[in-house]
Image: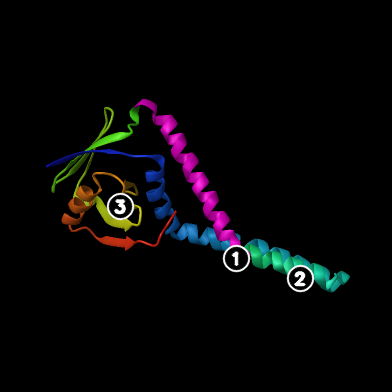
Amino acid sequence: MIILKEEFTIDDALVGLFYHTQHSEDYKKKLNRYRLVSPLIWLACASVIFYIRSLPIWIYLIILTFCILWYVFYPIRFKKLILKKHREFLKNKIDELGALLTKKDVFHLSKEQIIIEGNNTQTTITPNHIEKMLVLNTHLVIFIKSGGTISFNKDSANYDTFYNFFTSLNLKKESDLNWKI
């Protein structure tokens, strides 16, 4: 059995949470909906006004340029909005948990189970409850089948031990080294 003490930050939790969100179907649907609806409404209004009231062509071209810029740059804004929402969610969670939250958790790693201990709390995860292991350029993210994630920072002193342990469990392994938050 391997016993390790690991420190976590909000940014570590944010990486796993945002990666999971960004690759969900719901995120992609919302992004495409917001990306298309506003420019289409503006174009429709401009077209109606252009044909009915003979709107000057230069105003129509300004609206068309705005719509194109919206379509191109809205994904960046949407990503920032979702990150802000997740960061606020995590800060509220930290405030709710208060004394139960620990900055450092103790991990007991064995082939049969993984025990995570914090302030008067203990979580047990068996390897068959782990969905996959994801290697990012800054973190190792473990996806739990119930929907949670555990993110280990590559700058951590224990990173290699965690990586080797989870690799030895023969989990489904994915790598996305170009992804960044």
Q: Residues within 10 Å of mark 3 (few under 14, many from 20)?
A: many
Asked if the magenta segment contains residue 94, the reply would be yes
Q: Earlier in the sequence, mark 2 or mark 1?
A: 2
Element marked by disc 3: strand
Percent x, y of residue 156: 29, 44
* Residue 61: mark in rendering: 2
Q: Residue at x 32, y 32 (%)?
A: 102
**Which quarter of the rendered picture does the N terminus lie within?**
top left
Q: Earlier in the sequence, mark 3 or mark 2?
A: 2
Please name the amino acid that badge 2 sits on. Answer: Leu
Which residue corresponds to mark 3?
140
> Is residue 81 visible in this depiction of the protein?
yes
Element marked by disc 2: helix
Q: Earlier in the sequence, mark 1 or mark 3?
A: 1
Element marked by disc 1: helix
Percent x, y of residue 60: 78, 69
User: Extreme top residue here?
Assistant: 99
User: Extreme right residue here?
Assistant: 53
The one of 179 and 147 positioned closer to us in this rendering: 179
Q: Residue at x 42, y 59 (%)?
A: 23
Q: CA distance from mark 3 to mark 2?
A: 47 Å
Q: Residues within 10 Å of mark 2 (few under 14, many from 20)?
A: few
Which residue corresponds to mark 1?
72
Asked if the magenta segment contains residue 75, the reply would be yes
